[in-house]
Each structure stands twice: as C-alpha cells, then as structure tokens.
Image (spheres, rainbow, N blue to C red):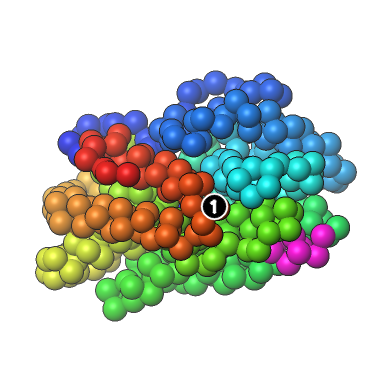
C-alpha cells in the first residue's frame, strides 16, 4: 500500500522516505515519522500515550511461547508501529465523531495488529528489505515464516473484535478483500501495459479498505454510520499517490528501500508518463524483462536485493531515462490529481467530519513539500 524536486538521483544517496530518528522507544515513547506534520504532529502528545498503552496490552496478550518472539519483533520491540498513521486516523476520527471512549481504547490493539498484518503481508509480497529503516519480518525470518505469522496476526485481530459483531464484520470484510488483492498482485508483478489500469485500481483498493477499516471502526463505536466509500477512496488515493511520488522523486533504493520501478509496481505517475509519452511503455517492458526472472527464483530478500543492485548497474541508462520521463511528465500531472482528489475527499465526507478529512488529506499532500513541490494550495 497506503501511505514518498530537485529530485534526488541514484548517485545522490538521499535519505529514505519516511525515515525516522534512529533510537529505541521505551514503553512510553514511540518514534514517529518525521515527515508527516499537520494533524499527525498536533495529536502526538494526546494520542502517543494511548498507542503506547495499546502496545503494552498487546505485550500482555495470552499467546503461545512459539508465537511470542515473532510478535515481540513486530510489535513491542518495534520503535515505530507499522502504518502508524492508521491508529492516528482511527483516534482522530473517534474524537471528531463523538469523542474517544474507553471502547476505542479497548479496540486500539486490534487497529495496531491490523496495521502490522498489512505490513507483514505487503512486505512479503513486495519483497521489501526494510520498513522505516528497520529490517522487515520477511527479510529477517523468510517468506515461509511470514505466512503463519500473518495468519496469527489476523487471528488476533478477529479475537480482539469478537465481542462486537460490527467490529468483527469490519475485520472480516477487510481480510476477505485484502487476501485476494495480495494474491493477485503477486501473480501480476512486472505486468504488461494492457493491465496497468487494473493494477492501479487494485493498488488503490488495498489502501482504501485499510483506511476504511480504521475509519469505520472509530465511528461504529460511537454509533455513527460508516464513512461514505467515495470519501475514503479519495483519501486512500491521495495517500498512495503521495507515497508513490516520493518513491520516484527521492530514489528510495539508495537507502535500501524498495524502488517501485525496479520492483515492477504500477503507479499513477508511471501511467501518466506513458500516456504523455507512449513510447515509454516499450521502455518499461524492456526494463522489466531484465528483472522478471528474479521473481521466479523465489530468492531470499537480501539476495534478491543484491541481484537487483547488480542488474541496475547494467540497466542504469534505461532506468534513468524512464525515471526522468516519469518525473518530468508523470509526477506534475499526478500532483494535480492529488489536489483534485483532496477536494473530493472533503466534499464526499459527512459535513460534521469534513474538517477532519481536510486535515487528514492535507497532511498527506503536505508530505510532498520535502520533494520541493512547495506550491500546494490546501
């Protein structure tokens, strides 16, 4: 998923997107993403202790001795909870829709566990070596271990939701859709241009249902109606597009983060670049033809990264050409769409929650300022 110019080039070695201060958190301290400001920064003092409390409750869960080391690695030993903006979104929505109740605090561990499930599943499918500067579960323990661990996380989410059939239903709907989307993505890595649009639709849907789960759990507990799907779609689209723009602009691979172009991932900036320069489609196919065989080998992630780095040296002129066209033709148009989607997200939200949606979406768009895209009227 989701949730990245004087843009950097591979030689620049710029810091990875969403990097964090490299320090361990205590039971009362969480390392927050340093590049997301706005509502996420304003609410840290209030929501940070609630998230720390929820992590402590996860630590106290009655789980087997065999599962506990993996759960520790992914949760309470992790300086920064994965997809940390989701629990912030959940708590902000609770506050805006009637106030944060004890029931919201009780369900916060499930929100965090759901976010960790998304991270483990995403990182396994994407073959990601790191997340926020820390080795991923799959890279450390292997894809085979990630499968039962993801199942355990899903089971814990459902167990934490069983006392409320509405929350249980939200979790069940999420898992049923998300599982299918991840399988489809794995089977369609390095896709042909004919399915680029379908690929992007699936990508947006992943981000939509993750945000929808957090948003709807918050309002359901306050006995409010679910969010309109149209509003959540636009919020999720903005978050995903911003992450994809940052990925291409800041060149994450220079800091051992996955590079979307090398990973065979379709993004809106790529699609727009191909629409603007149709010959680019053939260049992308040629570039991906070099990388596709690596996926069939099912290599451990560290070895995969080494081989991708070696391939990049051989294909660097083609890579730089594709990236240059995306930055020149695809990114500006994507930013314009982000601004239009921002306005739609606010417009499609229930009137009492429009200020909240404005602040959530604006915080994502503001992330682009680090890429020197500063003229962003919000």
Where are the magenta residues, as a range? 164-171
**Where is residue 304 shown, x and y percent of the image?**
42, 50
Few, some or many residues within 10 Å of mark 1 (<14, 14–19, 20+)? some
Q: Main secondary structure of the magenta part?
A: helix
Asked if residue 215 lies left or right of residue 154, the reply is left
Asked if residue 50 lies left or right of residue 201, the reply is right
Residue drawn at the location 46% of the way across and 63% of the way down: 348
311 in magenta: no
Q: Secondary structure at mark 1?
A: helix
Residue drawn at the location 49% of the way across and 72% of the way down: 184
6 or 211, which is in the foreground?
Answer: 211
Asked if 205 appears above or below 13 in the picture, the reply is: below
169 in magenta: yes
**Where is residue 241 shown, x and y percent of the image?**
36, 54
**Where is residue 93 shown, x and y percent of the image?**
60, 48
Query: Can residue 110 be seen by looking at this rendering?
Result: yes
230 or 107, which is in the foreground?
Answer: 230
Residue placed under numbered mark 1 in the picture: 353
**Where is residue 354 shown, x and y percent of the image?**
49, 52
Query: Can residue 90 be seen by looking at this rendering?
Result: no
Which of the 4 image quadrants contains residue 220?
Answer: bottom right
Asked if 357 appears above or below 209 in the picture, the reply is: above
């Amino acid at each position: 998923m989701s949730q990245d110019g004087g843009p950097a080039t591979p030689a620049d070695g710029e810091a990875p997107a969403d990097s964090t201060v490299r320090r361990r958190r205590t039971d009362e301290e969480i390392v927050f993403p340093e590049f997301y400001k706005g509502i996420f920064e304003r609410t840290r003092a209030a929501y940070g202790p609630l998230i720390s409390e929820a992590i402590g409750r996860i630590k106290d869960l009655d789980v087997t001795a065999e599962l506990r080391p993996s759960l520790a690695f992914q949760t309470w030993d992790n300086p920064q909870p994965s997809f940390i903006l989701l629990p912030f979104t959940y708590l902000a929505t609770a506050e805006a829709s009637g106030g944060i109740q004890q029931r919201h605090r009780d369900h916060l561990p499930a929100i965090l566990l759901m976010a960790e499930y998304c991270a483990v599943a995403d990182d396994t499918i994407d073959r990601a070596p790191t997340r926020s500067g820390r080795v991923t579960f799959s890279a450390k323990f292997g894809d085979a271990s990630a499968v039962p661990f993801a199942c355990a996380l899903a089971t814990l989410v459902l167990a934490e939701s069983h006392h409320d059939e509405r929350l249980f239903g939200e979790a069940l709907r999420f898992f049923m859709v998300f599982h299918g989307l991840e399988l489809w993505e794995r089977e369609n890595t390095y896709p042909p241009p004919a399915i680029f649009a379908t690929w992007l639709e699936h990508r947006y849907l992943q981000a939509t249902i993750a945000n929808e789960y957090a948003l709807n759990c918050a309002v359901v507990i306050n006995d409010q109606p679910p969010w309109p799907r149209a509003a959540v779609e636009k919020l999720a689209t903005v978050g995903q597009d911003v992450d994809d723009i940052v990925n291409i602009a800041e060149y994450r691979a220079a800091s051992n983060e996955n590079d979307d172009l090398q990973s065979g991932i379709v993004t809106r900036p790529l699609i727009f670049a191909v629409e603007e320069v149709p010959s680019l489609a053939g260049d992308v196919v040629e570039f991906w033809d070099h990388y596709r065989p690596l996926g069939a080998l099912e290599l451990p992630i560290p070895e995969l990264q080494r081989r991708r780095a070696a391939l990049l040296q051989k294909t660097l002129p083609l890579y730089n050409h594709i990236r240059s066209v995306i930055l020149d033709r695809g990114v500006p148009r994507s930013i314009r769409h982000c601004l239009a989607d921002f306005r739609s997200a606010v417009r499609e939200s229930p009137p009492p929650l429009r200020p909240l949606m404005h602040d959530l979406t604006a915080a994502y768009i503001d992330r682009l300022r680090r890429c020197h895209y500063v003229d962003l009227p919000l």
